[in-house]
Image (tube, rainbow, N blue to C red):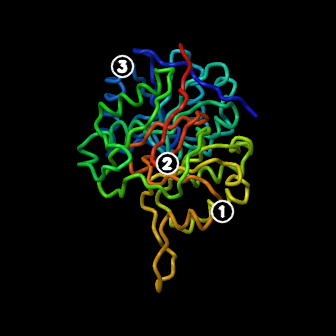
């Protein structure tokens, strides 16, 4: 199995590239991306926007053709001045160019890649093939420029009992800055406030405590990746803390994807599960003459009686903002105490 490949820690003034590995910049999101760039700049980085993040650059549902997206991303991987790559948004396009990735460039100069949603496919593929510690977390447009700011998220909608709910650009910026620049573990992750309408507050779905490497992303993308040559080796799930979230899908699709992972043996290997806050996950297709299942009920319908700690309603996914979760880094889940702790750093000393 490929070893974990940690990038070196960033320093103040290092170049962070904002790229478009998935969807285009929509015209009504231009201001959000500009604010996201300003947020990254205020964190102490020099920000470079890749050409495909410009308004008007698109092909169908993507920021460019697969060849254009791969060329731009690989150019950033090969650029020694670029020390990290942040996706500006997700979408539907990443799968179209995974087979064009310059994996040798990743191995020669590993740098953190940040993103979620469709970009989690890229993070997982890079981790599977090179061991790269990518960071599942917020993106430039709808994260750093959107859900990080109070005019997008509004007041707190919960203050969970496990830890005080925190929110604000300063708190989030410090958390992400430490993840990228500090070769020391982040330790216990704070509980974040979510955007209005999201039902938040971490929940103990199954008690217990476990430690293992973090593996996960958008559930549908993770399940789909396992049917490709970029699939994570079975050993990657041994003792792992599996985290996932989902958006814009019916519970029946979540149930099917969880069963795909069950059939592939994933649930017999992992040590714990962390479930993000679902966003626009509906009960469409359920019988009209009975109550629809909850997401928790769907999860345990698939898990059965496996004695896994399960921590639900964790701040990852489209309900935003996101905790930074580095793939392959050891974390401790205490579902009983409703805490998630990063025990290792995402980066090595410079």
Q: Nearer the viewer, residue 26 or 120?
A: 120
Horizontal side of residue 300 vs 129, given as left or right:
left
Residue 118 spot, x, y in % from top left: 53, 46
Q: Within 10 Å of the Cα at label 2, are there few (<14), some (14-19), or many (20+) other Cα atoms?
A: some
Q: Within 10 Å of the Cα at label 3, are there few (<14), some (14-19), or many (20+) other Cα atoms?
A: some
- Residue that carries the numbered disc 1 in the rendered image: 259
Find numbered disc 2 in the image and state the secondary structure of the residue it sits on: loop
- Residue that carries the numbered disc 3 in the rendered image: 44
Where on the picture, by quarter, is residue 306? Answer: bottom right
Residue 37 spot, x, y in % from top left: 35, 29
Q: Is residue 200 above or below residue 284?
A: above
Q: Which residue is painted at 56% across and 33% down in the image?
A: 134
Q: Is residue 113 above or below residue 316?
A: above
Q: Within 10 Å of the Cα at label 1, are there few (<14), some (14-19), or many (20+) other Cα atoms?
A: some
Q: Which residue is painted at 46% across and 79% down in the image?
A: 291
Q: Nearer the viewer, residue 119 or 346?
A: 346
- Residue that carries the numbered disc 2 in the rendered image: 91
Residue 247 spot, x, y in % from top left: 47, 56
Where on the picture, by quarter, is residue 123? Answer: top right
Asked if labels 1 and 3 touch by Cβ distance under 8 angstroms, the answer is: no
């Amino acid at each position: 199995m490929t070893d974990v490949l940690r990038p070196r820690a960033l320093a103040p003034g290092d170049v962070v590239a904002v790229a478009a590995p998935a969807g285009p910049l929509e015209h009504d999101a231009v201001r959000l991306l500009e604010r996201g760039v300003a947020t990254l700049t205020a964190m102490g980085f020099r920000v470079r926007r890749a050409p495909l993040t410009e308004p008007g650059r698109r092909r169908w549902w993507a920021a460019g053709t697969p060849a254009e997206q791969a060329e731009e991303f690989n150019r950033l991987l090969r650029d020694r001045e670029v020390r990290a790559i942040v996706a500006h948004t997700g979408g539907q396009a990443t799968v179209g160019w995974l087979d064009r990735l310059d994996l040798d460039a990743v191995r020669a100069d590993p740098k953190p890649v940040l993103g979620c949603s469709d970009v989690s496919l890229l993070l997982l593929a890079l981790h599977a093939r090179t061991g790269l510690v990518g960071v599942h977390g917020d993106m430039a447009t709808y994260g750093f420029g959107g859900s990080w700011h109070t005019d997008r998220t509004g007041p707190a909608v919960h203050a969970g009992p496990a830890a005080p709910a925190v929110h604000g650009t300063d708190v989030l910026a410090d958390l992400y800055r430490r993840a990228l620049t500090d070769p020391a573990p982040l330790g216990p992750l704070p509980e974040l406030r979510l955007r209005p309408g999201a039902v938040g507050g971490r929940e103990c779905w199954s008690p217990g405590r476990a430690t293992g490497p973090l593996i996960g992303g958008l559930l549908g993308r993770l399940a789909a990746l396992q049917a490709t040559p970029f699939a994570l080796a079975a050993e990657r799930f041994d003792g792992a803390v599996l985290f996932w979230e989902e958006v814009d899908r019916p519970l029946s699709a979540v149930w099917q994807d969880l069963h795909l992972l069950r059939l592939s043996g994933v649930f017999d290997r992992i040590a714990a599960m962390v479930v993000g806050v679902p966003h626009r996950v509906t009960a469409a297709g359920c019988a009209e003459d009975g109550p629809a299942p909850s997401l928790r009920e769907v999860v345990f319908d698939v898990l059965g009686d496996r004695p896994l700690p399960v921590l639900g309603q964790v701040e990852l996914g489209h309900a935003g903002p996101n905790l930074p979760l580095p793939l392959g880094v050891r974390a401790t889940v205490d579902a009983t105490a409703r805490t998630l702790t990063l025990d290792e750093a995402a980066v090595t000393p410079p």
